[in-house]
Structure formats: C-alpha cells, structure tokens
Amino acid sequence: MKFLIFVLLSNFAAFTAAWAQAPVDWYAEKVENRPFVRWWWHGSAVDSVGLTYNLEEFARQGIGGVEITPIYGVKGNEANDIPYLSEKWMDMLGHTVSEANRLGLRVDMNNGTGWPFGGPNVSPSMSARKLVTRRWEVPESHVIDEPMFPLPSEMKQPDATFQRAIAVSRSRTIDITDRVLKDGSLKWKAPEGGPWRVYAIYSGRTYQKVKRAAPGGAGLVLNHYDSIAVRKYLARFDEAFEGREWMIPDSFFNDSYEVYGSDWSDNLFDEFQRDHGYDLASGIHEFLGDNGNSPERKRLLHDYRMTLARILEENFTRVWTEWAHSHNARIRNQSHGSPANILDIYAAVDIPECESFGQTDFDIPGLHSSGPSRPSDAAPSVLKFASSAAHLAGKPMISAETLTWLTEHFHTSLARCKPEIDQMLCSGVNHVYFHGAPYSPKDATFPGWLFYASVNMSPTASLWEDADGLFRYITRVQSFLSAGKPDNDILLYFPYEEIITRHGGGHYLMFDIHKMDRVMPDVKQWVADIMEAGYDVDYLSDRLIDSLTVTTDRRLLSRGGNSYRAIIVPRVDYIPDLTLDKLRKLSDMGANVVFSDDISSAVGSIGIPSEHLRRSGVSMIRRLNEAGGHNYFI
C-alpha cells in the first residue's frame, strides 16, 4: 500500500497542470501548504526595492513564505552590508513583514546569523564548554607539586575553570581537590598502593565561532547547556523587537545542532550526581577510556550521556521555546545532531524539521544524475525522527530543509528535485522549505547572488520560470497531507539507551545525520525491513510511550490522535525498567507488543492470531506477561 502511495505521488505532477485548469473538489489550500524558502540575506545588503521585487516574485510563482537567515556578504559589496539587528536592519525586516502581509506570505526568522546560535553578545563565560583534562604519573611516596591553574599557554584555554583533582591507583580513587592552594598549586604526597595517576579536570571552552556569520552576527557559539546564558543571548532580540512587536515573525528557526565538541558544563558534576546518585569524578579513569571499554565505562558513558541530554533539553530547547511563546511566535527546530534522544527534542518544539542532504540514488527509469553531488543522508529512517515525534506528540506541521547539496549550481533539474521531495512527503513531511533562495537586488545580472550549498530557488535562477509547476504540485500534496492524519501501521521502539551504552570511543555522541550509518546501522535496517514488507512506521521513544492509550479494538492511540496496530521492540541488551513496565501495561490493556530478534518475522506477525504465533514456537520462549496479554517474543 505504501509503495502505491509513493507511485501515486511520483505520478501526481503529470496531472497537476490539468487539475489546475479544471474545477475539482480538493482540500482547502492554506498558505502553509505552499513551499517556503530559506531566504539567504548576503551581508543583509537588502533594500526596499529588492525586497519587494523578490517577495512579489515568490508570491507570483507560488511560494508561501520565507525564512530569513543572514550570512556573510558579497565580496566587493561591503559598503552596502547592514549590521544584524541594527536600526536599519530592523527597518528592512519591517518592510519585509509589511510587504509579506500585503502579498499573503508568511515570514520566519533565524534566531541568529549563519549557524549555530552565537554572536557578539556571547562572552567567553556564555560560550560553549568542553571537558579539558591533564594527567600526571606519580609513584608512591613521591610529591606532586604542579600548578593547576591558570593552564599553560600552549593549551590555549585561558578561560578554563578548574573543577577537580582526582588521584587514581589500581585499587583506590581519592579526591584531592582540597589540596589545591589559593595560588592554584597542588602539593600532594602519593600514599602507598601506587603508582598513582593524578587527573586535573577543567571546564574549558570550545571557542567555536558562528559559521557563515553575517555582519553584526559574528562571535562565539552559545553554551546550550546553560539556561542563564541562553536567556542572556535571547535578550538581544527582546531589545531589538521592543516597540516593534508587530514585526515578530510567525516562527523562529534553529538549524541542525552543530555545536561541535561541546561535551561539558560548569555544573555537570552536580547535575550528574543529581541524576544518578554518585560522583562522575570518582570514575574519571574509566570515563576517559584509560581502562578500555570496560562494563564500568559503559555505565558511566550511559549516565553521562543521559545527563547531557536532559540539560540540553531543559536549559536550551525548553527555555528557547518558552521565550518564543512569550512573543506569540512558534519554534521551528532541527534537532538532529543533538547529543540527546532527538525524538524527545523534536517533540518539545512546535514544528519539528528534518533535512535532506545530497542526492538519493533512486531506481527510476530515465532519471539521471543532475551533475556533481554527494550521496544522500536523507533515508526515511533519518527523516522519520521529526515526523514520528510530531505524530505522537500532536504537532500538526512537520517541515523539512529540502534539497541541500542536491547538485552544484547550474546542474539542477526540476525532474531531479521531485523524487527527493516525494521521499520527504512519504516520510511524513507536510511543510517543505527549499534550501534555498539567495536574495539578489532587483538589478542584479544573471545568475545573481549565490550560496554554495543551495539549490537556487530564487528569481534569478535558470529554472525559476518553470518552477511554478513543481510548487503547485507540492502545494496540492501538502494540502492533502495536512487535511488528514497519518496512517502508519507500526511503532518501532527506538533503543536510545542501548545506542548510548554500546557506543564506546569518545564520550561525546551526536546524532548527526551524516553519521547515522555508524551510530544506528541496525535501526536503519529495521526501518528498511518494515517498509520493504509493505508497512509504514513511526519511531517510539521511552518517554513518548507515555502518550499512548489503547482503544477497544486493541489499537494504540497517540496523543496526536494517530493510531497504530502494534509496537515492535527489537532485540536489545539495554532497555529501561520503566519502559518495560509501560509496555507491560499496554499489553494488559490489549495492545499488540512484539519482541523480536528478527524484524521481518515481527512484521509478519502483525494481524496474525496469537494461536498461530504459539504454533510457531512462541510458547516455548519466555513471555513478558505470563498471565496473558498480547506480548509476543518471536
């Protein structure tokens, strides 16, 4: 059935032009059903004439709205650059909003320039943190006499904050932080039982700067784990919009989480102790991997990653969302890349957004590569994180950054764009954002201003005059998708805690779309197996299980009003006790919960009477609920 839907979508464009001419009964078209564009403002060197011209062209061709993201300027045009959030910049934003209202368009806005969040108001004390350590080998009975702070200049960490000093032998761990004197020196005589390794632990700085920053937006990247820093960062926008509340955008946007190496927080030891009831520093030898990938290290990595995930959601995602809501605006967020369960981060925002990147190798006769590109990371198993969270949490809109790096400039064809968009639509997206449309002045000669990573969906593009057919197709499909509810058959348990436990290596683990093949190869295969069997699927997190109830006909109903036939729990070694308890309760209520080593067998069991499962040998395998219910181990 799902294959049929894909075929129908793939052929839909052939009928769009004819339907556009004929009176048909169709779903009401809303402005958000049209495709939107990420509108790159090079140097924010915009003017009122150019803004009006671009917006009128967008409206004429069927674009529904813009997301303003300022970036670096055009070489040789620096005199026309406008500093971000300056009086003149806000005047240009006001003109944009006024003209968009006149034309029936929507306006979104990045909460920064380039990516990720950061800028000139981010001081070193507000900037992204990383763990910094030093170590010394100290024989027993020897004295270590070393300065703990400030750090040596060659370490390039002038702002690092000393936190702890820990001594570790084969059998003992001693906290020797209290031996550090006010002048920063540590004097400590190693006791018997050595040799000893002494660790000094610091909260350092990544010193990452905003990528592709616009004039007035350059600076250090924000510490996303610090709610005070986040609020100070957002205060810059409060000041800019004071007295201009009428121009606040429909939604504020955040790009994918690319805060590289930010694996620490000043209060991480306290937060870890609060979550897990023991001191992370006591296991620093294991945590840093100095004893290989021991069971103790697996536990430490799991617990550390759980704490990092929690403080990211609490101190950034929720603080930012509450701030936007206080301005009557929504949040559109790309959660992928986060060092957290991205399902839960997506579920916490108003509009979850996924992303396509590169070119998919579709097996479509006659479809040729449109020139230089890179393999796509946008498999359904990756795209479905945003839509799954939306379906379970009751978020009606799922957006997508679409066609990033599809090809190089001047190699793009509309025929190559369409199947990538179809894959998005079939993965639950109903709010496409093209990446992107660089602003060009009205009098700019062909090809106008360009942004290296974008498929150019702007008035200066060579495909612009023909793009309206694609835009109408997207609008029709998205109006259809938005009018109903998704009909996915299966909930696939996403084993987040399994993944963060089994992955050794460095302690910092990001769910980056470019690394999903390495982070969760089995999960990608499970999704592929379910879809190959003819079913569609949403992910289910440990937290989102709470959103489920069971109907009288044994279907699982989400808070978003979507129903499912079963939950499949793949074979995992680590699963929270609370999750097992919730699954047991759902089973007691009549839900089908299938535990399986083989996803293909699990899919085949959906809808098959339990007595058939028993004939297949299920009764010989331990069942979660011996008293009855509908849990099956296959």
Image (cartoon, grey):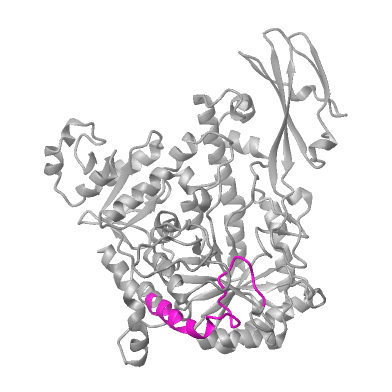
Q: With 273 as the anchor, is 396 left or right in this view?
A: left
Q: Position of residue 152 (x, y in %)?
A: 83, 34
Identify whether 511 is placed above or below 167.
below
Quarter-wise, where is residue 108 in the image? bottom right
Residue 479 or residue 392, whichever sits in front: 479
Q: Which residues are magenta?
A: 449-477
Identify whether 109 is placed above or below 258.
below
Quarter-wise, where is residue 551 in the image? bottom left
Q: Position of residue 502 (x, y in %)?
A: 47, 34
Quarter-wise, where is residue 451 in the image? bottom right
Q: Position of residue 99 (x, y in %)?
A: 62, 87
Is 237 in the magenta? no
Q: With 618 as the anchor, is 142 left or right in this view?
A: right
Q: With 485 as the anchor, is 303 left or right in this view?
A: right
Is 471 in the magenta? yes
Residue at (58% x, 43% y) in the render = 308
Identify whether 498 is placed above or below 324.
above
Q: How many marks?
A: 0
Residue at the farthest right position: 183
Q: Quadrant of the N terminus?
A: bottom left
Residue 409 or residue 133, whichever sits in front: 409
Q: Quadrant of the C terminus?
A: top left
Residue at (68% x, 84% y) in the render = 445
Identify whether 299 is placed above or below 312.
above
